[in-house]
Amino acid sequence: MTKKTSCSELAIMGSVPAFTSPLYVGCPNIGDRQAFLARVNDILDRRWLTNNGAYVQELERKLEEHLGVKHCIAMCNATVALEITIRALGMSGEVIVPSFTFVATPHSLQWQQITPVFCDIDPTTHSIDPRRVESLITPRTTGIIGVHLWGKPCAIEPLEEIAQRRNLRLLFDAAHAFGCSHNNRMIGGYGDAEVFSFHATKFFNTFEGGAVTTNDDDLAARIRLMKNFGFAGYDNVIYIGTNGKMSEVSAAMGLTSLEHLDSLIELNHRNYKAYALGLGDLPGVRLVPFNGKNSYNYQYVVLEIDSEVTGIDRDLLLQVLHAENVMARRYFFPGCHKMEPYSSHFPHAGLLLPETEKLVQRVMSLPTGTAVTEEDINKICSLIKCALKNGDKLTNSIRLGKEVPCAS
Ligand code: T4K
């Protein structure tokens, strides 16, 4: 189908969808299938499937080298990696976190009876606003968790300064930020530790998986014990622990993905530039920028929709795109403070989170990665333009159920 330009051509108005099958945000990147399958065969031949196997060890060494950190501990996922690291850092009482993050961030605290204290974000960066952190510190505060949202480093230095001066632990949730840098240093070596996610939806994936990175030898040793039930050797448990181990098949996927890292980043960057070209100058639409100083993985193509300018709000725009089989997503709606158990614990938290509450209504993420082509992106951009051009008409007919002529 050629590009849609008029309101009546949109699938939400009954026309044929622009795409025959769904385009997902977070569709996994699959590297060289043969290379992966060869590793899987090797695992099966050797019959060593998990418990610090050869591929996990190889992945850990390669990641340490790539990130320039002393220790990388591979894990079964980032949520368990966060829980273990929080515990190994001795966090307790209250820890300051943004509410605008995936719910795993506060859950990893609450899971171990630590209260997440939600901090508002900087509306430009979408990350925790360090100017608001200090007023949330109480005698029970033991740490801060900054999130490098969308793969953009959060305010690392200001948070480091506060943590140092107030004697708090500083952990970075770097779930989105594998392959990104800050001041010419890879994300992975900041704060007391950083935690990556290698979930299927991340640009670098191990099916499920994650890793903790740190330059602190003692912390790394504690985390290694904790992720393996506290075993220091056969029959020798010297610490409290759980099961956070990465399996060999996950490590095989990671090693295979690692061989394609540069080309995956290049592809995401190319996609990002195609979106920027297609959407750059649209009034009321802000494409979250990546400035030239750092390297990024460009895995999240994020738009902010200002409905007062566009005439169509984010949720209706999503409805329009979903009807076309473009499965764009809102993140992280409605904000962690509005999810349970936090909304019951802190029913008025929103009063201190005005920027978060505004952003969760405006933000959406678009498909990228190996699952979309430049031609797909051009089509998606033209759908968005068409929806915006007809914003008032769509709002009146879909939202308000009014009969609106749809000729233009
Ligand atoms: N901290 C932060 C800041 C995070 O964003 C995350 C995870 C974590 C911590 C914890 O990391 P992990 O413990 O997961 O390692 C997804 C992911 O499950 C989650 O990893 C991710 N962040 C979060 C932002 O997104 P959902 O609820 O959006 O997943 P789901 O199933 O709706 O899938 C997302 C999209 O991907 C869909 O449009 C379909 C597509 N998809 C998904 C999978 C799993 C595929 O096409 N193929 C697939 O295999 O959480």
Image (spheres, rainbow, N blue to C red):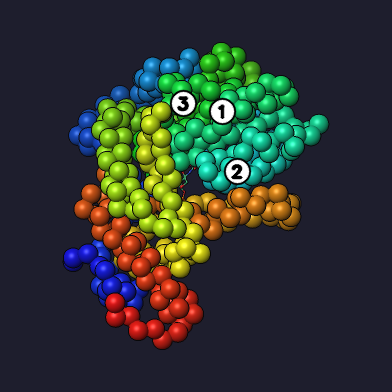
**Residue 156 disc label:** 1
Between the residue at mark 1 and the residue at mark 2, the CA separation in whole angstroms equals: 14 Å
Q: Residues within 10 Å of mark 3 (few under 14, many from 20)?
A: some
Q: Which mark is residue 265?
A: none
Quick one: label 2, few (<14), some, or many (20+) residues within 10 Å?
Answer: many
The tag on residue 121 is 2
Whichever of callouts 3 and 1 sits on the residue coming sooner in the sequence is 1
Name the amino acid, label 3.
His
Residue 277's place in the image compared with 152, above or below, is below
Towards the viewer: 300 or 396: 396
Disc 3 target residue: 182
- Asked if the residues shown at circle 3 and circle 1 are in contact, with their CB atoms under 8 angstroms apart, the answer is yes
Classify mark 3: helix, strand or loop.
strand
Residue in view at x 73 percent, y 24 percent: 166
Residue 244 shows up from this direction: no
Q: Residue at x 55, y 36 (%)?
A: 147
**At label 1, which amino acid type do we have?**
Ile
Rendered image quadrant of residue 37: top left
Residue drawn at the location 30% of the way across and 58% of the way down: 380
Instruction: Point out residue 56 in the picture as x, y percentages from the top left corner.
Output: 39, 24
Quote the CA–CA distance across marks 2 and 3. 19 Å
- Residue drawn at x 33%, y 47% is 276
- Quadrant where the image shows the N terminus: bottom left
| Disc 3 from disc 1: Cα separation | 9 Å
